Structure formats: C-alpha cells, structure tokens
Image: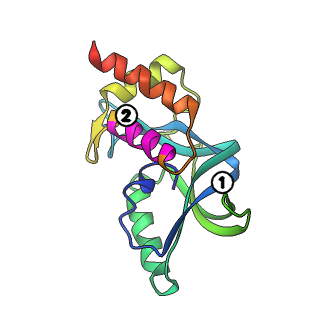
Amino acid sequence: GYGSLMWRPGFEYEERRPARLRGYHRAFCVYSHVHRGTPEKPGLVFGLDAGGACRGVAFRVEARRAEDVRRYLQAREQVTLVYRDVMKPVELVDDGSRVEALCFIVDRAHEQYAGRIDFETQVRLIAEGEGRSGKNPDYLESTVRHLDEVGLSDEGLTRLWRAVEQRLRR
C-alpha cells in the first residue's frame, strides 16, 4: 500500500510492515474520474510510476484469503483499468527481507495517466477534487499522516499538503 490502502485497506490481514518497492515511485500521476474527482473535474491520485523507489506498507494475508483479497483489490483499484496488477519483490524495511507483493503499476498509455504535472497544477487539482471516495485533499492529508505514523515521512508530500492547505484557506 502506498496511498489509501495504508489507512483503509478494506480487508483482514495478519501483519502490516513498512516496505520499499524499487524501480517505481509514488507520484500524483493519475487523473481521478471516480474516487477523488469526476470526468468533468478530475482529481489526482497516486500511481506507481517507473523509476526510483516507493516506501509504503506490505500486508500479509492468510493463504486461504489471498485470492479473495486479490479480487477485492482488483475491483477497488481497477475501476477504470489505469493500473496493471503485477507481483513484484518488495523489501521489508525493518529486517531487509524480501517478499513478493501484489502491486498496481500505472499504465502510461491509459487516458488517465497524467504524467509529470507541475506543482501548482497538482495543488489546484487536489484542492478542488472530490469523488465517490471523498475529497482529494483528505486523500493527500491521510497519506502524509500515515507515512509519518509508520516512520516513512515524505518531505515532498508534506510540502504539497501545506500548499493545498494554504489554497483551501483562501
């Protein structure tokens, strides 16, 4: 989990541990037309995009529940098919061990792929976005808070959150 799955997984799990995925980074690179925006007024949500590394959490689920959890995650994350679900090795931060994890990698060919968006446009889209799962600023704030809680603070996201807060106070 690198976004809302960290604070609202929606499934039972045995264990949750800080983890790092290499080769992909968390980015506001997906226009949200459902969960945090609409087609007329898109919000922005995270995707795992090529390059760098992403810190988040890995969930361990009981083997007997694994397929149900996979189906749940596919239904939740693949509403518009903007991601490709793949198994990738992730490193557990606390002991350096590696495990295979289901990851949702952004499809750069999808119409909702936003690519690199300048900072001010990110601030505007996030401040104004609202969809089925709630307000886009809440999504960013919760991500910042939960990364802090698991010891994976992200300076760039904190800076973005402060700018969104400032815009909302106008």
Is residue 88 or residue 1 the one in the foreground? 1
The mark that comes first in sequence, 2 or 1, is 1
Residue type at mark 2: give it: Gly
Name the element at disc 2. Answer: strand
Q: Which residue is mark 1?
A: 20
In the displayed structure, does residue 162 sit left or right of residue 89?
Answer: left
Please say if 137 is above or below 77: above
In the displayed structure, does residue 16 sit left or right of residue 32?
Answer: right
Q: Which residue is mark 2?
A: 43
When asked about the image quadrant of residue 118, the answer is top right
Q: Where is residue 117 drawn, in percent x and y?
A: 54, 25
In the displayed structure, does residue 41 sit left or right of residue 81?
Answer: left
Tell which residue pokes out farthest to the bottom in this image. Answer: 64
Q: For residue 9, which numbered disc appears in the image?
A: none
Query: Residue at (33%, 40%) from the top-left corner?
Result: 36
Residue type at mark 1: give it: Arg
Query: Residue at (62%, 57%) from the top-left corner?
Result: 19
Range drawn in magenta: 138-148
Q: Where is residue 113 drawn, in percent x and y?
A: 52, 38
